[in-house]
């Protein structure tokens, strides 16, 4: 395991000596400097320390100036400020400049240990978040990058070119084509990738709730507002805010949004303090906004404000060459998650996929592949005439199959998959419920509730599910 190195910057020789001895006894490697200028030079050298203990009051370059330099040289290294009594204003300014924490002299050894441990844990968590974001970016790259369709190649090129420009982007296309995938792709390839990505579904909430969701409110703004609540614009910070289904936003809220985008500021509901907008705004819709403008359903000035760059994603039926590639991608993506024995889709099924028009586009294809991975013994039939996905049980194939509509697939398949996973895990643990709960990463009580719901008792249980879908 790597030994943690700590840079001690303090002009007091006794403090430097004491901290070096104590931290060494705790298993840390230490290096000491007696001035701010030396600290700055040390941070520019190699190897870079993992953490800095920085005294505020030093001759020459003071602690705040050193902190500002350190954050420019290596912003990822946590800096803990060491301050004397009566330096509260200085500490507040240090935190604003990016200090991880502070300790007031004199401090207890346990307090120092805890502060260092907390700062290092935050650093580790930040590294994990970076890894997850990188994996997400790779996933989005893969899903957008597997297409050989000329229109999709152009979509990727435009998205790459505008990612770092910070201008608004309007993403259009039918439901399920991957508008949010493209929005995330733009975010993770922009200079804001390390900042939050926040999505708001404008069609999911009525006007009043959507307004408070976007802009937040102050305590007492309305009945039930017992605390202050920041809006999505604030939560997005310097990151990216996606206004999904922007075409469903009410006209009064469209007017307020236009004002915010023009002035880059607003006030919370019931508040007077001005909040500065720093987030980049992306918008998506499955509507033809130019038609909505012509019919008076969407503000023309807001449309032009959002439509600086427009990217339209073509429907799946216009890029059928992507169907095998996407299907293979989804098999690889979900096979392990659902513990499926399926390595690839049967030729007959893929031929049906190629003939199908996919009114639900990529999302419908993804759900259908999930369905097959979970229930590979069930036939998935595609009806080109009705554009419905149908499933047929092996024992009932002589009968007319029941159509399985898209919105039923996800919930039904998830329920069946969950029960099958629980049963498999119980069989692996010989019905040791505590061990099964641990393997499933759920509480023992949650597992008991699931067994009761599904009428599973002991090692002899009722069938987990039959494949018939009603």
Image (tube, helix red, strand yellow):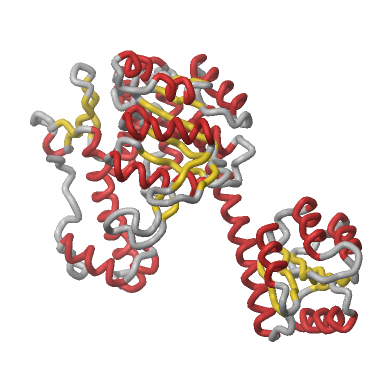
State whether residue 304 is above or below residue 456: above
Q: Is residue 197 left or right of residue 372?
A: right
Task: Classify the position of the N terminus by image quarter.
Answer: bottom right
Whether residue 461 can be seen here: no
Q: Residue at x 53, y 41 (%)?
A: 277
Q: Residue at x 64, y 61 (%)?
A: 123
Q: Is residue 462 left or right of residue 153?
A: left
Q: Residue at x 48, y 24 (%)?
A: 305
Quadrant in which residue 324 is drawn: top left
State whether residue 221 is above or below residue 309: below
The picture places residue 313, in percent across and down from the top left corner, at 44, 21
Q: Is residue 166 left or right of residue 329?
A: right
Quadrant in which residue 322 is drawn: top left
The picture places residue 35, in percent across and down from the top left corner, at 90, 67
Q: Is residue 47 left or right of residue 205?
A: right
Task: Classify the position of the C terminus by image quarter.
Answer: top left
The picture places residue 118, in percent across and down from the top left corner, at 62, 71
């Amino acid at each position: 395991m790597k030994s943690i190195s700590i840079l001690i910057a303090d002009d007091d020789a006794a403090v430097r000596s004491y901290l070096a001895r104590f931290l060494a006894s705790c298993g840390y490697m230490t290096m000491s400097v007696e001035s701010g200028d030396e600290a700055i030079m040390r941070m520019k050298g190699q190897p870079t320390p993992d953490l800095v203990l920085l005294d505020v009051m030093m001759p020459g370059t003071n602690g705040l100036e050193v902190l500002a330099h350190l954050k420019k040289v290596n912003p990822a290294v946590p800096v803990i400020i060491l301050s004397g009594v009566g330096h509260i204003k200085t500490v507040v300014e240090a935190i604003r400049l990016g200090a991880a924490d502070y300790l007031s002299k004199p401090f207890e050894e346990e307090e120092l240990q805890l502060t260092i441990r907390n700062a290092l844990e935050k650093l580790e968590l930040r590294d994990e978040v970076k890894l997850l974001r990188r994996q997400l970016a790779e996933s989005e790259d893969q899903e957008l990058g597997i297409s050989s369709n000329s229109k999709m190649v152009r979509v990727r090129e435009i998205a790459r070119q505008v990612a770092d420009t910070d201008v608004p982007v309007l993403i259009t296309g039918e439901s399920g084509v991957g508008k949010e995938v493209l929005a995330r792709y733009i975010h993770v390839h922009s200079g804001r990738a390390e900042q939050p990505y926040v999505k708001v579904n404008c069609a999911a909430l009525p006007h009043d709730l959507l307004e408070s969701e976007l802009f937040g409110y102050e305590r007492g703004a309305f009945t039930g507002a017992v605390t202050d609540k920041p809006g999505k614009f604030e939560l997005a910070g310097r990151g990216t805010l996606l206004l999904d289904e922007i075409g469903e936003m009410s006209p009064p809220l469209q007017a307020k949004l236009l004002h915010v985008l023009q002035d880059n500021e607003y006030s919370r509901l019931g508040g007077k303090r001005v909040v500065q907008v720093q987030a980049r705004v992306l918008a998506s819709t499955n509507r033809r906004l130019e038609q909505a403008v012509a019919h008076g359903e969407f503000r023309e000035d807001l449309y032009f404000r959002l439509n600086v760059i427009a990217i339209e994603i073509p429907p799946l039926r216009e890029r059928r060459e992507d169907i095998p590639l996407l299907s293979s991608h989804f098999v690889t993506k979900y096979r392990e998650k659902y513990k499926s024995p399926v390595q690839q889709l049967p030729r007959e099924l893929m031929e049906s996929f190629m003939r199908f028009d996919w009114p639900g586009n990529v999302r419908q294809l993804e759900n259908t592949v999930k369905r097959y991975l979970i229930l590979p013994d069930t036939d998935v039939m595609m009806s080109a005439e009705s554009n419905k996905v149908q499933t047929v049980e092996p024992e009932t194939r002589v009968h007319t199959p029941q159509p399985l509509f898209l919105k039923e697939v996800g919930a039904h398949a998830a329920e069946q998959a969950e029960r099958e996973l629980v049963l498999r895990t119980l069989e692996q643990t010989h019905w040791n419920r505590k061990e099964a709960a641990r393997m499933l990463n759920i509480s023992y009580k949650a597992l008991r509730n699931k067994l009761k719901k599904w009428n599973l008792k002991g090692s002899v249980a009722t069938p987990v599910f039959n494949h018939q879908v009603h």
